[in-house]
């Protein structure tokens, strides 16, 4: 890990020196970063985790807001849904929620990481300034 940091620092110093001379440098010119399969997979994993953990609470929220049922709160709603419909009732409507969440998160994470790699080519995992993030 330290070797990568030293190499990135040496490259950055090299590029700063070359900018003062205003000549092109083969180290400084970098091809566009490919969109990584790892980024897409991490978006998929995040979508699955969020949907599976959050859907029961979304079910409770919708039922409480609809006013058709009388619940004392979220916990009471989850308890009664589990009692009447079983545990499967907590994940009713999972496939539409999961498919939209997967599409959104996979695209968002993949594009966001590709843009970050382009904005900081010598240290793609570096923290960017707030102005660059915006």
Image (cartoon, rainbow, N blue to C red):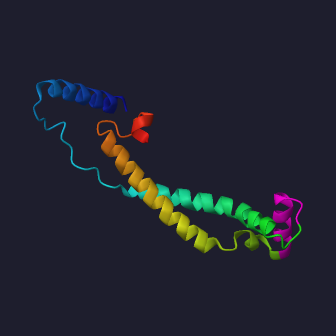
Q: Which residues are magenta?
A: 71-84
Relative height, residue 86 to residue 76 (above, below): below
Report the side of 128 relative to 44 (left or right).
left
- The secondary structure that dominates the magenta segment is helix
Q: Residue at x 41, y 50 (%)?
A: 112
> Is residue 99 in view?
yes
Image coordinates for residue 12, horizontal then vertical, percent: 25, 29
> Is residue 39 in view?
no
Image coordinates for residue 78, horizontal then vertical, percent: 81, 64
Report the side of 62 relative to 51 (left or right).
right
Q: Residue at x 43, y 60 (%)?
A: 107
Decide which of 134, 102 is in the foreground and name it.
Answer: 134
Q: Residue at x 88, y 64 (%)?
A: 71
Q: Residue at x 23, y 30 (%)?
A: 11
- Dividing the picture into quadrants, the one containing residue 69 is bottom right
Image coordinates for residue 34, horizontal then vertical, percent: 29, 54
Report the side of 115 relative to 106 (left or right).
left
Report the side of 36 relative to 30 (left or right).
right
Q: Please check the rendered image and state whether residue 82 is part of the magenta-colored stretch, yes or no.
A: yes
Relative height, residue 7 to residue 91 (above, below): above
The C terminus lies in quadrant: top left
The N terminus lies in quadrant: top left
């Amino acid at each position: 890990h330290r070797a990568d940091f030293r190499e990135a620092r040496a490259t950055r110093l090299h590029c700063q020196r070359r900018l003062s001379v205003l000549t092109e440098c083969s180290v400084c010119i970098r091809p566009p970063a490919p969109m990584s399969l790892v980024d897409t997979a991490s978006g998929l994993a995040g979508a699955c985790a969020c949907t599976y953990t959050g859907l029961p609470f979304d079910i409770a929220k919708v039922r409480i807001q609809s006013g058709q049922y009388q619940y004392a709160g979220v916990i009471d709603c989850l308890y009664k849904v589990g009692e009447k419909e079983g545990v499967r009732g907590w994940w009713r409507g999972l496939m539409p929620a999961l498919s939209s969440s997967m599409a959104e998160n996979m695209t968002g994470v993949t594009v966001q990481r590709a843009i970050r790699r382009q904005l900081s080519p010598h240290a793609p995992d570096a923290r960017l300034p707030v102005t660059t993030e915006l």
